[in-house]
Image (cartoon, rainbow, N blue to C red):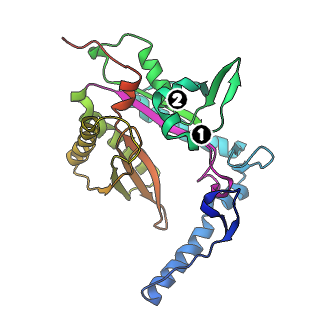
């Protein structure tokens, strides 16, 4: 396959050669069988055959068009998702698709995630950014009113469409796109509520995944990356809450050193599909930094 030197489409094209090595013929046979099964389950082929979705190059790569049949399936999934969240005490919210660039500077995304964001646009002498994340919007909504400790926890959920820049050579069907809708939720809670709230989120995630037949998955605790914001104490407290929640559930997990987001550690759930392939899926993040950067507060009992 072709590949640009250092991933830069302005540099020379190289030829990438793939190879595999196996301990014995039995392993090679199993691998070939898996590749055959993978071809049968290629979602790009199935999407075309079943008339579920398409990616129209005239509109741009990595942008998905849901056809009527696919839209009906998506609606069923979204209705199920809404029912699951509202039954667990979540309120549904909606937020804009663009915002003033200053919002992304406050959140830190412009400093730490700029390479994954589309170019900005000028609107009446102000600079706007199409959103790559939903988090800052929910922070603004929390800040829009006076909050009391009696109001907490506040649980908000949104099917938020986001747009992220991906190089054309990395796009792949529905698996790597430039625009997608993610099931996103934010819980604002007291420090003493944190661990129990994480446990509840993990149980909700497990319940939803199991309904779709995903009963085998790996958990990874992703820790502080080299490029990050916040004090050591904030990171230690956030990491301890994630670990405490998994320990309460008795779930085993691995460690992904430096794999956290720039604003906080996270638990990554990697699901296994019908033929044993592993895919990154749900993420549970603990973030003390955004509340601090947006100056979020509440009236305490004192």
Residue 7: which quarter of the image?
bottom right
- The reply to whether the C-beta atoms of the residues labelled 1 and 2 are less than 8 Å apart is yes
Q: Residue furthest left?
A: 302
Above/below status of 70 relative to 263: below
Relative image position of residue 38 (x, y in whole percent):
57, 68
Residue 84: which quarter of the image?
top left
Q: Is residue 95 magenta?
A: no
Within 10 Å of the Cα at label 1, are there few (<14), some (14-19), or many (20+) other Cα atoms?
many
Quadrant showing the N terminus: bottom right
Classify mark 2: helix, strand or loop.
helix
Identify which residue is drawn at 68% across, 53% down: 168
Q: Is residue 176 magenta?
A: yes
The disc at residue 117 is 1
Q: Is residue 262 left or right of residue 33?
A: left
Q: Which residues are magenta?
A: 165-190
Q: Residue furthest right?
A: 58
Within 10 Å of the Cα at label 2, are there few (<14), some (14-19), or many (20+) other Cα atoms?
many
The residue that mark 2 highlights is 104
Classify mark 1: helix, strand or loop.
loop
């Amino acid at each position: 396959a072709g590949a640009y030197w250092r991933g830069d489409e302005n540099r020379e094209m190289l030829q990438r050669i793939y190879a595999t090595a196996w301990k014995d013929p039995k392993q090679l046979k199993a691998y070939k069988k898996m590749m055959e099964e993978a071809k049968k389950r290629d979602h790009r082929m199935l999407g075309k055959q079943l008339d579920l979705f398409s990616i129209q190059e005239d509109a741009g790569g990595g942008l998905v068009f849901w056809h009527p049949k696919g839209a009906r399936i998506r609606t069923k999934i979204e209705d199920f998702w809404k029912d699951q969240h509202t039954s667990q005490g979540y309120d549904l919210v909606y937020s804009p698709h663009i915002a003033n660039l200053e919002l992304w500077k406050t959140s830190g995304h412009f400093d730490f995630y700029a390479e994954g964001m589309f170019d900005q646009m000028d609107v009446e002498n102000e600079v706007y950014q199409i959103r790559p994340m939903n988090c800052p919007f929910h922070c603004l909504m929390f800040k829009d009113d006076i909050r009391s400790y009696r109001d907490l926890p506040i649980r908000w959920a949104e099917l938020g469409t986001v747009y992220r820049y991906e190089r054309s050579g990395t796009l792949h069907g529905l698996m790597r796109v430039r625009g997608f809708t993610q099931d996103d939720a934010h819980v604002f809670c007291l420090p003493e509520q944190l661990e129990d709230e994480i446990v509840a989120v993990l149980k909700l995630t497990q319940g939803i995944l199991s309904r779709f037949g995903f009963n085998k998955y790996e958990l990874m605790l992703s820790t502080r990356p080299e490029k990050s914001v916040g004090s050591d104490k904030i990171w230690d407290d956030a990491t301890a809450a994630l670990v405490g929640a998994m320990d309460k559930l008795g779930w085993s997990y691995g460690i992904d050193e430096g794999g956290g987001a720039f604003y906080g550690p996270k638990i990554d759930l990697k699901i296994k599909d019908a033929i044993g392939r592993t895919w990154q899926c749900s993420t549970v993040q603990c973030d003390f930094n955004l509340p601090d950067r947006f100056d979020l507060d509440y009236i305490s009992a004192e």
